[in-house]
Amino acid sequence: MFDLKDLYQEVIVDHNRNPRNFGEIEPPRKLLEGFNPLCGDRLTLYLNVDSGQISDIKFSGSGCAISIASASLMTEGVRGKSVEEAETVFADFHELLTGDGAEIDLNHMGKLAVLAGVRDYPSRVKCATLCWHTLRALLAGANAPVSTE
Ligand code: ZN
């Protein structure tokens, strides 16, 4: 039998081992650090926005498999999107992990849906959302590091 959970696990392992968009934009127009003290995840997000569109996004840092895979999937998911679209994706993703999930259509989530299983592990939700909180703060013009605590 085809097991969706195994496939999800495989994608997470792949994105952790070979993170996409890993590295720095030199020089980036915006950058911001994010920390998840509970797990020890640390990342730095690099971002270029042109005419309201995310033209380039990269990240560096270290952390658990969930945090790295999530950042990798996020950069893939929002690159080329408008800032407004990225906000919508984040709202859906956050609802997927922290809401009752009833209204979320996984088909619309694209690859981000592979992280749906994290909702069963509340202590890991911050690992998966750290990169998103950092992105939102960066888009909002924050220049102090983001902490999930
Ligand atoms: Zn973590």
Image (spheres, grey):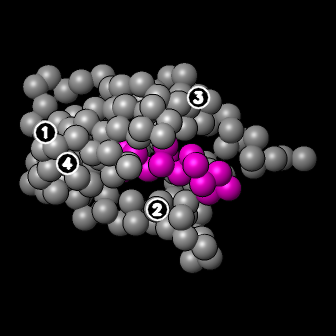
Is the C-beta separation of discs 2 and 1 under 8 Å? no
User: Is 124 on the left-hand or right-hand side of 75?
Assistant: right
Structural distance between the alpha carbons of marks 2 and 3: 22 Å
Amino acid carrying label 2: it is His
Q: Which mark is on residue 30?
A: 1
Indicate if the residue with disc 3 has its beta carbon within 8 Å of ligand 1. no
Q: Is residue 139 above or below residue 13?
A: below
The percent position of residue 136, horizontal first and vertical second, equals 26, 54
The percent position of residue 42, horizontal first and vertical second, equals 37, 31
Is the C-beta separation of discs 3 and 4 under 8 Å? no
Residue located at (20% from left, 48% from top) = 138
Q: Residues within 10 Å of mark 1 (few under 14, many from 20)?
A: some
User: Was residue 127 drawn as part of the magenta stretch in this picture?
Assistant: yes
Upstream in sequence: badge 4 or badge 1: 1
Amino acid carrying label 1: it is Lys
Residue located at (75% from left, 49% from top) = 4
Q: Which mark is on residue 138?
A: 4
